[in-house]
Image (cartoon, rainbow, N blue to C red):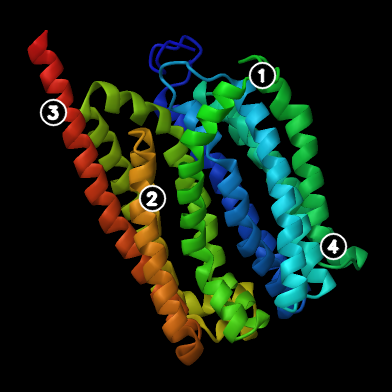
Amino acid sequence: MSESLLDNPRSKNSLSRNAMWAVGGNLFFGAGRFLIIVILIQSFASDQVGQVLYGLAVVTPLAFLFYMELRTIYVTDTKGWTQVGHCLATRLGSNFVLLFFLALLGLLGWKFAGWQEQQVLIIFLVGAVRMAESWADIYLGVMQKSERMKNWAISQCMKTSSVLIWAGFLPLLNLDIWWLLVGWAAVTFVVLWFYDRPVAAKLADLKLCWDHRISLKLVLLGLPLGVFVAMAILNQNVAQYFIEAKLGVKEVAYFGALLGFVWGLQALQNGVNQSVLGRLAVYFSRDIKEFWALLMKLLGCSWLFLSLVLALVWWRGDLLLQTLYGEEYAQNADLFVVVMGAGMVIFTGMTLGDAILACHRFKSRMLAVGCGLAVNVLLCGLFVGRFGLAAAAWSTMAAATVTVLVSAAVLIYATREQSARQKLQKEQL
């Protein structure tokens, strides 16, 4: 695909229409994931919920490390040097590596961290979910690059609604909580095979392409990107590691219940960002002013919406927690405003981070994420044991703020450098 995204004749939908589909799909996706947490909290003991949330927090950063953001590389590739088959072949190899590390992680956790058999099982099941999602991720990337966000949204809705229905049946069938993950992995695989794959096949050649030179190039380019994405996820989950170690798995459920609102809205924000990621990449290569105009629209819409959410949480957050989770979880209502405030900062960092990805400044982005992660680990290590969940909430806020500040500095530097390069090219002409 040598033509640019804006010149692609397959891009029939306008930017605004694609954004609407992305917002709608991710709104459903985020709401569904949030409702799954609500169902689990209402149906299972808090320590069981904590085990699942802790398993997700442990496995997800490792999984995204080996994702290597191949979809982002493919979508933002305006020169056409990589094809879908190269990404699929590389992703297949990375999944085998992920499986090895999951086995090692389970063994170490069982031997040295005191994990019980069910916690090890949950780790492997979360890994199965992430591997299925990683394969679907490439097919979704084909839809994204072709600006077929309608198909992308339908895929996400089918997966989310199926998992949500399965979660609702768990207590009725008297099944253990880990069966949620079994159904989650199965549903993801079925939808990717019978919907994602046929749709993507109409847009690109899906045949595996085993080219070690291209795969090596993808790994060299994508691994730093995977590292920083994994670090970003660690930055959001690191508090849960300290909570589990110093306060117990039940408190992980309490904190995860508050973060559930952030995760739901995060899916919505990610959908908007991903719908314009390719367009941002083209604007960066063509016109910096258009790049900044689109970026500021993204930030402005995000801030307006999240300000309304934050006001609602400040006003009646206690009632919201009690209604959804029950009295046991409503005791942390005072922290709800802090967590949602941290979420607002996190979403700003997400948008700036995606803009940096559009600039192909993958390694530079790691600096921002690394600084935020270092602050989070330091503050959680010092204060979670002494001040409990309050320290975890404020540490998350501080880490997100550091990430935003460094991301903004990186983005300003990258766009100024690109602007100067474009100006020099015009003068030479």
Whole-percent x, y for residue 190 in the image: 80, 36
Which residue is situated farthest in the right direction here? 173
Mark 1: give few (<14), some (14-19) or many (20+) Cα within 10 Å: some
Amino acid type at mark 4: Leu
In front of the other: label 4 or label 2? Answer: 2
Q: Earlier in the sequence, mark 3 or mark 2?
A: 2
Amino acid type at mark 2: Met
Q: Gap between marks 4 and 2, in whole Å? A: 40 Å
Amino acid type at mark 3: Ala
Q: Which residue is mark 3?
A: 420
Label 3 with label 2: CB-CB less than 8 Å: no
Residue closest to the eye, 116 or 13: 116
Q: Residue at x 58, y 27 (%)?
A: 215
Q: Which residue is mark 1?
A: 209
Residue closest to the eye, 109 or 245: 109
Q: Which residue is mark 2?
A: 366
Label 4 with label 1: CB-CB less than 8 Å: no
Q: Gap between marks 2 and 1, in whole Å? A: 30 Å
Mark 3: give few (<14), some (14-19) or many (20+) Cα within 10 Å: few
Q: Gap between marks 4 and 3, in whole Å? A: 59 Å
Q: Which residue is mark 4?
A: 170
Q: Gap between marks 4 and 1, in whole Å? A: 41 Å
Q: Earlier in the sequence, mark 4 or mark 2?
A: 4
Q: Earlier in the sequence, mark 4 or mark 3?
A: 4
Q: Residue at x 72, y 70 (%)?
A: 109
Q: Which quarter of the picture shows residue 213?
A: top right
Mark 4: give few (<14), some (14-19) or many (20+) Cα within 10 Å: many
Q: Earlier in the sequence, mark 3 or mark 1?
A: 1
Residue 168, above or below 328: above
